[in-house]
Amino acid sequence: MSVYCLGKLIGGSERSIRTFLQNVADQSGVAISFEIDPEDEAALAESPTLRSEGLTFAVYSKAGDSDVISAWNEAREVGVQAFGTEPDCETDVTDLALPEPVKKQLTRTKLGKFICGLLDDATFSGGIAFFDGSIRQISDISRETCRERLLAGLLLLWDCGPDTLYVWHA
């Protein structure tokens, strides 16, 4: 198994969203694709918010990869070192409050940069999920809470994450 990343942005033209996402990916050092399997698109559409017209995407560690595992492992290593302890698989990201220095270190990693670049722009509504197998839950929360939970999730082993589709509104 691996860890995958899917998302969707809504609230702009396809061209503006594609340009925005490509720029965020380029600045973060990850690869992005807009060719999404119909089953994956259907999983994103489980959220009523994401049923609107928009652009779906997948994120990869680098061009040619099929997942984000190497970028996840990079972020986890940086995050755990900065946090000073290694959260176990029983850790709930909703209970994991990251000190500012840990967040700062995570935002310097490829996935941290991508997450923040995606969520720092208030133009679009959207959703993003990191999962290994399938998305198991949907959490419709604020943009800031999405950022907090996604960054906290990077401290977990890739196969211990909540497999949550985080959805936010512009």
Image (spheres, rainbow, N blue to C red):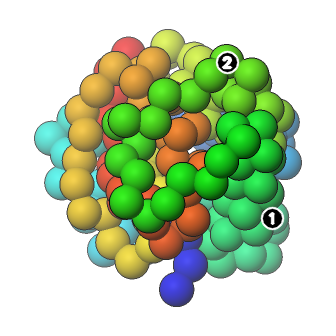
108 with respect to 91 (left or right): right
Q: SS class of the residue under badge 2?
A: helix
Rendered position, 13 above or below 4 = above
User: Outermost residue, bottom direction?
Assistant: 1
Rendered position, 93 above or below 105 = below
Q: SS class of the residue under badge 1?
A: loop
Disc 2 marks a residue whose amino acid type is: Glu
Q: Which mark is residue 100?
A: 2
How far is disc 1 from disc 2 in space, using C-alphas? 28 Å
158 with respect to 63 (left or right): left
Q: Which label lies toward us, 1 or 2? A: 2
Rendered position, 47 above or below 115 = below
Disc 1 marks a residue whose amino acid type is: Lys
Q: Nearer the viewer, residue 40 or 103?
A: 103
The disc, 1 or 2, on the residue closer to the chain's N-terminal end is 1
Q: Nearer the viewer, residue 76 or 23?
A: 76
| Disc 1 and disc 2 in contact, CB within 8 angstroms | no
| Residue 57 makes an appearance in the image | no
| Residue 63 makes an appearance in the image | yes
Question: Residue tagged by mark 1?
Answer: 62
Q: Position of residue 79 (x, y in %)?
A: 72, 44
